[in-house]
């Protein structure tokens, strides 16, 4: 199941979902366009974790959610669907387990992220599920690239792992990975933990992110950020209605039940994001 390709009908539905209307080919131009279209049309979001709904690493469940129900999702879902779509086109795809902020959290972070290795004019890191931070495939080599408006970089560590790093102003995120097939049991356990444990940041607070025409849009709790090449602007949402409006208009999500999260978002805001509340440019 985890290594299946989408059927021809499912691939057509996926390509329609992301707005890709050409004949897909097994080449770098197609790969690049699909990843860019995916992160533009399908947002990263953790609404189901916030609403207490079950989540898994099953790409079939992710396809039903992201494509058929036109929702967003997190790494296990984004990259699960993307891997199956790329296989249907003919790409060789390897699912890889990674550790988000392993540089701080240590090896306990491993399995907290799913990313992909795709063979296309050499090995390439492909990742539509890292909070939309990565906007295009990356050659598996040391370097820095600007995925407008965010810089991303790859490098190797002394222990032989790779590290992907991305920054927004003074905020930096990273994950470490071996360029090897994932430990699927570990991914499944970490998916369950992140979706259910009170210590998980995905349980603690809402996060929604999307790329759009040179802008990076991010909602963390009630703080909405719009990042462009000129800097970052932040504002606080003021009501459940504003939350629903932002989800619909900025993040392309029609999830009416999300308004029920507003009291919890307000209650957690000061503790988790108080130092980020002031507007910045």
Image: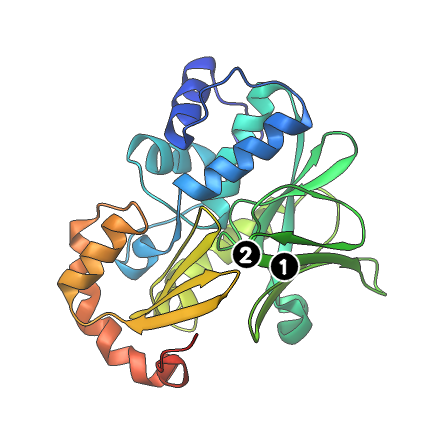
Q: Are marks 1 and 2 in contact (CB under 8 Å)?
A: no
On-image quarter of the C terminus = bottom left
Above or below: residue 104 compared with residue 31: below
Asked whether residue 59 appears in the rendered view, the answer is yes
Question: Quadrant of residue 32 in the image?
Answer: top right
Kindly identify the residue that appears in the image at 67 percent across and 67 percent down: 107
Question: Quadrant of residue 224 in the image?
Answer: bottom left
Asked whether residue 58 appears in the rendered view, the answer is no
The x, y position of residue 135, in whole percent, is 56, 47
Kindly identify the residue that appears in the image at 80 percent across and 54 percent down: 142
Above or below: residue 233 compared with residue 241: below
Q: Is residue 80 left or right of residue 32?
A: left
The outermost residue toward the front is 230
Kindly identify the residue that appears in the image at 76 percent across and 37 percent down: 123
Could you say which is closer to the camera, residue 78 or residue 217? 217
Category of crowding for the residue at label 2, using alpha-carbon neighbours closer than 10 angstroms: few (below 14), some (14–19), many (at least 20): many
The tag on residue 129 is: none
Q: Which residue is mark 2?
A: 149
Could you say which is closer to the camera, residue 37 or residue 78? 37
Q: Which residue is mark 1?
A: 151
Report, in whole angstroms, how far the alpha carbon at label 1 lies from the one at label 2: 7 Å
Per the image, label 2 sits on a secondary structure element best described as: loop
Q: Is residue 45 left or right of residue 139?
A: left
Per the image, label 1 sits on a secondary structure element best described as: strand
Q: Is residue 129 left or right of residue 270?
A: right
Kindly identify the residue that appears in the image at 70 percent across and 58 percent down: 153
Above or below: residue 4 compared with residue 186: above
Category of crowding for the residue at label 1, using alpha-carbon neighbours closer than 10 angstroms: few (below 14), some (14–19), many (at least 20): some
The x, y position of residue 83, in whole percent, is 56, 33
The x, y position of residue 6, in whole percent, is 49, 22
The x, y position of residue 93, in whole percent, is 66, 32
């Amino acid at each position: 199941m985890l290594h299946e390709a989408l059927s021809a009908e499912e691939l057509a539905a996926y390509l329609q979902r992301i707005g890709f209307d050409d004949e897909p080919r097994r080449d770098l131009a197609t790969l690049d366009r699909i990843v860019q279209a995916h992160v533009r049309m399908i947002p990263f979001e953790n609404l189901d974790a916030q609403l207490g709904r079950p989540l898994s690493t099953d790409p079939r469940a992710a396809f039903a959610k992201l494509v058929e129900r036109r929702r967003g999702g997190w790494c296990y879902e984004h990259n699960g669907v993307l891997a199956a779509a790329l296989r249907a086109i003919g790409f060789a795809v390897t699912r890889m387990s990674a550790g988000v902020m392993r540089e701080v959290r240590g090896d306990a972070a491993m399995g907290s992220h799913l990313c992909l290795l795709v063979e296309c004019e050499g090995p390439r890191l492909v990742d539509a599920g890292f909070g939309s931070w990565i906007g295009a495939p990356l050659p598996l080599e040391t370097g820095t690239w600007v995925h407008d408006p965010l810089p991303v970089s790859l490098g190797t560590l002394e222990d032989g792992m790779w590290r992907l790093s991305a920054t927004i102003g003074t905020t930096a995120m990273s994950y470490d990975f071996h360029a090897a097939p994932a430990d699927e049991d570990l991914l499944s356990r970490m998916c369950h933990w992140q979706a259910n444990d009170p210590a998980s940041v995905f349980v603690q607070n809402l996060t929604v992110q999307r790329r759009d025409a040179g802008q990076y849009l991010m909602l963390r709790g009630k703080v909405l950020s719009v990042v462009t090449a000129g800097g970052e602007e932040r504002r606080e949402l003021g009501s459940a209605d504003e939350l629903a409006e932002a989800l619909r208009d900025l993040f392309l999500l029609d999830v009416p039940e999300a308004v029920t999260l507003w009291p919890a978002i307000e209650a957690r805001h000061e503790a988790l994001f108080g130092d980020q509340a002031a507007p910045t440019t």
